Image (cartoon, rainbow, N blue to C red):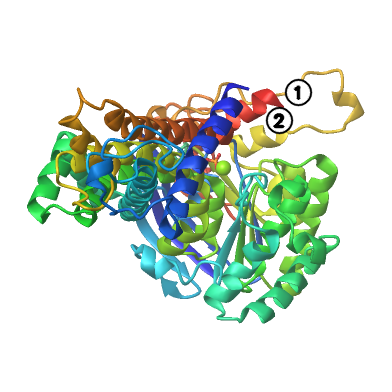
Amino acid sequence: MRHRASLILGAVLVGLMAAAGLVSLAWTPWPLAEIDVLNKLAAPSAAHPLGTDGLGRDLLSRLMAGAANSLSVAAGAVLLGGGIGTGLGLLASAWGGRVEEALMRLCDLSFAFPALLFAIMLAAAFGPSLLNTGLAIAFINVPIFARVARGAANQVWVRDFVLAGRAAGRGRAAISRDHIVPNIAAPLIVQATIEIATAILAEAALSYLGLGAQPPAASWGRMLAEAQTLLWVAPMQAVWPGLCITAAVLGFGLLGDGLRDWADPRLVRRQA
Amino acid sequence: MIRVEGLSAALPQGQALRDVSLSVARGERLGLVGESGSGKSMLGLALMGMVPDAAQLSGRIALDGQDMTGATEAAWQPLRARKVAMIFQEPMTALDPLVRIGETVMEPLILHLKMRRRDARARALDLLAETGLTEPEAKMRQYPHQLSGGQRQRVLIALALACDPGVLIADEPTTALDAQIALRITDLLVRLSRDRGMALIFISHDLAAVARATERLAVMYGGDLVETGATAEVLANPRHPYTQGLIAARPRPDPAMIRKRLPVIPGTVPTLGDLPRGCRFAGRCAAELPRCAGTRPAPWPTASGQAACHLLEPAP
Ligand SMILES: Nc1ncnc2c1ncn2[C@@H]1O[C@H](COP(=O)(O)OP(=O)(O)O)[C@@H](O)[C@H]1O
Ligand SMILES: [Mg+2]
């Protein structure tokens, strides 16, 4: 029952964030860049449900646009890095021997490095922009997925139907594509969901440090940085983006946990 | 069709096959028997070029005149399914739970015979019908868990037959099935072998099934080929003490036997590392001579084949 609850709560949180982000692409209550200095740091009102920021821009509109940026960068980065990592993991598992050894040692090496620090270095080296932040986050996801994919694939390679496939004349690539990938999809999807939570946090951190979204683009991390100077004057400026980050990270985390328990055959059998 | 000479398979813990020489003629049905761990599966896998990475092979393997000694994975791959195919013991796990039956059987047709999907589907249907699967049309769309063990074994047989191989290796194809289904699958394999002129290597530890299915018999123990000959001849007049033990130990519906304890071969199959250097059966053999444990017996001719036992050595 517990996994059902986290699955539902996670899905609701993620759904809300994704919906807000999607809507922002077509419509926001106020134009995103509309500056109204006379009306800066306004209290919530009918016109501005969450008030305005230090430049008089509508806070709700900017939070919505921030959702679009944060979620798309995080999900895109995990998809890209996860895809490449999965490919490498499958390769390592299918070829074994020295190929596998070398790839896994490379992964170990990359894990010895704090991921966020590494992303900061990469983003700084590529130059500050949202795209480069995404690429940096994608990069740190490669070894994570390589390891998960290889571990899961190794368990599938020893199964009888793989032997039967080989006996039917199938090569490593065909077996990887048709038998390994479908059978490791579940753990990979769970991993991806959890890594998106981490990626949202990383994107926020990089944008907060000024390495991600550049003004006037809206991003939760960026909004936190802008609110910092006003913390004593207008604390809600920091609370809202902070809440959004928390909710999104929590949402993906719960969703990933729920999916994992749901996909775990041992739990399923115990329930049946 | 298949010719093996001096084939050995060395695993880190010992020899899973030792100097095995064997040949199978076109259309011939050979039984391969022995207790579990005697190397039957290893020999079957060696004929597919599929021994585990840990096993070092030496000796010669020729398939249909083609020398496959030391062949790479890439060289083996095109021969599998086309020249030699294999089915396995456990039909419940030999099918990918996520792939429909139809797709499984169509795979080799598309891969090896370059058939288009339409043609492959029609051919797969014929193959499934040929193996006696009921309602093959509907089953093509089903997933493995929707089929029984016997039905799955038929699917695996259809898969193995797809590219019309010259040899089918059936590794204990009926061990996981109940007796009646096992009998039907055995008869099916015999019929397919006859109809198609396909050689059959029938691996089993069920002597009754082997007697029913095969013309020639090879008995393995501890990685050695201990006795070969015509199936009927070997079963009626076994020459190697191991074969004699195996036959005495088989369960029979003999009224006189019911109250008596089933004779068994004393001891258990030693692990690979503990096999005697000479005759592998030394230590369990009732007729053991002093030299058995240390000296490997040569294969001596018997009525219809050979047996590797010091007892058969002609007096000088
Ligand atoms: N993948 C493997 N790794 C290590 N040892 C193996 C492997 N496969 C088989 N063996 C060993 O090889 C020997 C022969 O096994 P096998 O050919 O499966 O016997 P059988 O099929 O006659 O029961 C056994 O001692 C077994 O433990
Ligand atoms: Mg076996």
Q: At which x and y percent is residue B260?
A: 82, 18
SS label for mark 1:
loop
Query: Subunit of mark 2?
Result: B
Q: At which x and y percent is residue A80?
A: 33, 55
In this image, A54 relative to B92: left or right? left
Give residue A67's quadrant in the image: top left
- Same subunit, tags 2 and 1: yes
Q: Which mark is residue B262?
A: 1
Residue type at tag 1: Leu
Q: Which residue is mark 2?
A: B249
What residue sits 47% from the left and 30% below the top?
A254
Whole-number angstrom distance, CA of label 2 to CA of label 1 = 6 Å
Sequence order check, earlier mark of 2 and 1? 2
SS label for mark 2:
loop
Residue type at tag 2: Ala
Quarter of the image with the N terminus of chain B in it? bottom right
Viewer-nearest residue: A231 or A36: A36
Viewer-nearest residue: B186 or B290: B186
Q: At which x and y percent is residue A228?
A: 18, 31
Q: At which x and y percent is residue B244?
A: 66, 36
In this image, B249 relative to A179: left or right? right
